[in-house]
Amino acid sequence: MFSHIMIGTNDLTRAKSFYDAVLGTLGVAPASVDRHRIFYRTPSGVFSVSLPINGEPATVANGGTIGFACKTAEQADAWHAAGLAQGGTSCEDPPGVRDGSVGKLYLAYLRDPDGNKICALHRMV
C-alpha cells in the first residue's frame, strides 16, 4: 500500500545515528544521505527522515505511530535497546506481549530524539 514514509527531524546527523542503530537491528543498511534527507531502502518500502523543506521546525504527529516489523521478540528488544542507547525514550508500556483482537503481539514503543512515536512489532503465532 505504501511506497514510503517520511518524518521530520530538526537534527539530521542525530536522526541518522539513531535510525542507523535502530533499523540496523532489523537488518536494514545505514541510510543514504541526499541533501537534507536520509533514506532507508528495503524490498518492502522506504523509510525517510528529512529536515523540513519549508525551513520551519519539525514537529511530531499527535496520535501518530510508525511500526517496524520484527522477526522475533528478541529482535524487538534489541531494536528498543538500540533506540534507548541512541537517545530515544521508552513510552507506552514496557516491551512485551499484548493480547488484542488481532492475536498476540510483542510490542516495544519508543519516541525518537525528535519525539516521533515508533514501534517494533512481532506477530506471535
Image (cartoon, rainbow, N blue to C red):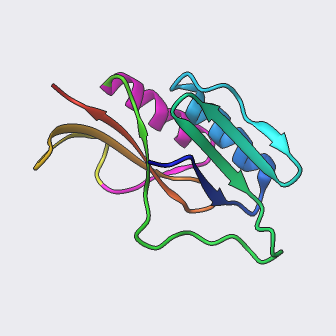
Q: Position of residue 16 (x, y in %)?
A: 73, 42
Judge whether residue 88 is colored magenta. Answer: yes
Rendered image quadrant of residue 74: top left
Q: Quadrant of the C terminus?
A: top left
Left or right, 56 with respect to 72, comes to right
Task: Give the residue at x 30% y 32%.
Answer: 122
What secondary structure characterizes most of the magenta part?
Answer: helix
**Considering depth in this image, is 108 or 33 the residue closer to the camera?**
33
Task: Give the residue at x 77% y 61%.
Answer: 51
**Considering depth in this image, is 9 or 39 the residue closer to the camera?**
39
Left or right, 15 with respect to 32, comes to left
Rendered image quadrant of residue 77: top left
Task: Give the residue at x 67% y 34%.
Answer: 20
Q: Position of residue 54 (x, y in %)?
A: 81, 75
Left or right, 36 with respect to 10, comes to right
Judge whether residue 103 is colored magenta. Answer: no
**Which segment did they paint magenta?**
73-92
Relative to residue 114, is residue 38 depicted above or below? above
How many marks the image carries: the answer is 0
Relative to residue 90, is residue 80 depicted above or below? above
Left or right, 52 with respect to 90, comes to right
